[in-house]
Each structure stands twice: as C-alpha cells, then as structure tokens.
Image (cartoon, helix red, strand yellow):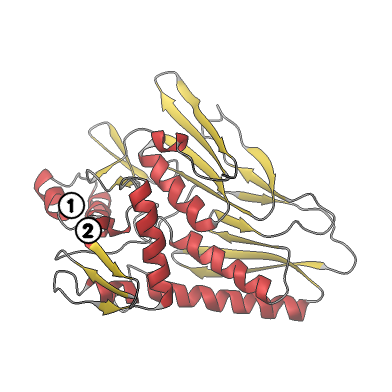
Amino acid sequence: MTPNSRFGLGGALVGLALIGPAAPAQDLSRFEYTHPAMGTEFRIVLYATDSVRGAMAAGSAFARLRTLEDVLSDYDPDSEASMLAATSGSGRWVRVSDDLWAALDTSGRLSEKTKGAFDVTVGPIARLWRWADRRGTLPNADRIARASAAVGWRYVHRDAATRRVRLAVPGMRLDFGGIGKGIAADEMLRVLDSLGIRSALVDAGGDIVVSKAPPGEAGWCIQLPGVRDGSLSDKTITVSEAAVATSGDQFRWFEVDGVRYSHLIDPRDGIGVTVRRLVTVIAPTGSLADALASAISVDPDLAAWAWPETTVQVLEMDDRGWRQKRQERQERQ
C-alpha cells in the first residue's frame, strides 16, 4: 500500500467479498473468470451476450494485467521498474514506457498530497521488513536508517516533455504494492469497456473496481469486512462506476516483544504501523482507492482531507476494543 508497502505486489489486502447480484436480464448473461497475478488472484465478473464474447473480453483484460505486471513488479529483476531502479544514483535519465510513466506520475502526485504517507520508493524499507518478518526479529535502527536514506518520492525526477525519469539516490527500489493492483484493475475495466462490456467487476485480490450496474440491479453489492473478533460486523454497500479498497493488519502482521507490527510501513520513519486499523475507501478509481487506503492506514488524519468524491471509514482498536474512529465523505468539488 508503499505507505505502506504491502510487502510488494504480492502483499494481500483484507478481503472484500462480492455478493450477488441476482438474475440478469434475458439478453445478457453473467460470466466469471480468474487469473493469478501480482501475488494474488484477479477475478472478473462481467455481463455479455454470450460466453465467446465474455471469454474474449476477459482474455484481453488479463493480457493487459500481465503487461502491467511485467512493468511494475518489484519481485521480477527483469521488470521495467526493477531495471529503472538499477540505474538509481547513476545520474542517468531513462526513457520509460507509457505505463511506467503513468504509474510514477500518479504515485508522485499522491505522494505529494499525502506528504509521503504514500510513497512507491519505500522498496528498500519494505525489503528490510520482509526479511524481518521471516526471521521474527525487528530490523535494527542502523539498517532502517540506511534503507531510509534511499527512500523519498522527491528523489524521483520526471521530465514530462521526454517521458524520462531519473532516480537521484543510490540504492532506490520501487515498490508499487500500495497502488499496483488498483492501477491494474482500472486498466482491465477500461479494456472491457472498449470491447463493449458495460457491466463488469474486477476484483484484484480485494481491491474492487466496478463499471455500470448489472442488468436489473441498482448497483454491485459489495460486502465490506468487519473485524475478526466480531465486535464490528461486515456490512454491505451498493456501488456502480466506483472502486473500493480496504487496508489493515488483520491477516498480515508479526509480533516482537509483545508489540504487534503491521505489514503496512510508514515510509517517513521506516517503521511498521503498531496501531491496529481497518481502513476502507470508496473512490472514483482503483488507483486512488488503493493508495489512499494504504496512506490512511499509516496516517488516519488524512481521512479528513478533501479527496473529491470519496468516502473513507477508519476503524481502530484502543483499550476499549474496536471503534469507528472516523467517517468522511467528500462530494464532487
């Protein structure tokens, strides 16, 4: 979630479940397809006139997903993001693909607005905490300091006229874990729409993006997760032409000396979040919902900022148990 890395593109979100919808109209049928990518399972639910058209559209969307994974993966040393990171500190300007440029441009703008709570350059710290998680020990202060020296969205220099990028500090590593699945879901939905599929849902391992409502329905019914101890139960919302993302530590965390550390990392201090939160964001795009859910998990005060056409809910645990700490809704500005 980057803020937050969800430990790279393979990180898991707290799950969102699709409920329904009911029977489709006579001229359209419901089809569902799945494909593994980015360390999770992507799912497409769409309405098409027949199975051939549905399968062809889903295949094109999954092809787009694979292209983006080849660009954004921080696990693949041959990905475009990894190869760009290999030039960090060299002073070289590198011309990048349209996909990487768009991802860096969107990420840079969100990093600036969140004052670094979201930051795709968190890679060196994310790698350090992945290693710590496997060993069950905290990274020491010196290691965190060295990794943090290579983190900072301002070190990503972009030249819009030539679509060239320079990573200014040695040892930088890009990690799109806090926005990559949202970007992919947006692009997949765009492909489906270009092929005439007007009613579709893309579930990117918990990040959900939907287009128009299913036939005969008011919208897509999405079940938002509650907390595992049952004190705040799941609830259902109905949305169309929107995105929903949830971020939290209910399923990914580790404990050292009685302190629970989330898989969500604050790029600004290099430390895993220790306050238990469950953040849900409803936004116009998957990339915005994905990145904000991560950033607000790191800094819940961001929920009160003016994010146009978003709804943000923050659940937090204190000594009295789980509470709804914040509910913010921003209309079109």
Q: Quadrant of the C terminus?
A: top right
Say which residue label 1 marks. Answer: 148
Residue 243: image x %, image y %?
58, 53
Q: Amino acid at mark 2?
A: Pro
Q: Is residue 163 left or right of residue 278?
A: left
Residue 138 location, quadrant: top left
Residue 15: image x %, image y %?
54, 49
Residue 281: image x %, image y %?
53, 44
Q: Is residue 226 left or right of residue 275?
A: right
Q: Secondary structure at mark 1?
A: helix
Q: Earlier in the sequence, mark 2 or mark 1?
A: 2
Relative depth, front residue between 55 and 98: 98
> Which residue shows up at 27% across the image and 76% down it?
83
* Residue 193, visible in the rendered structure: yes
Q: CA distance from mark 2 to mark 1?
A: 7 Å
Residue 232 location, quadrant: top right
* Mark 1 surroundings within 10 Å by alpha-carbon count, few (fewer than 14), some (14 through 19), many (20 or more): many
Say which residue label 2 marks. Answer: 124
Residue 74 location, quadrant: bottom left
Instruction: Check the image and report above or below for 270 versus 196.
Output: above
> Which residue shows up at 81% across the image and 76% down it?
50
Q: Are marks 2 and 1 in contact (CB under 8 Å)?
A: yes
Relative depth, front residue between 322 and 100: 100
Q: Secondary structure at mark 2?
A: helix
| Tag count | 2
Q: Is residue 188 left or right of residue 95?
A: right
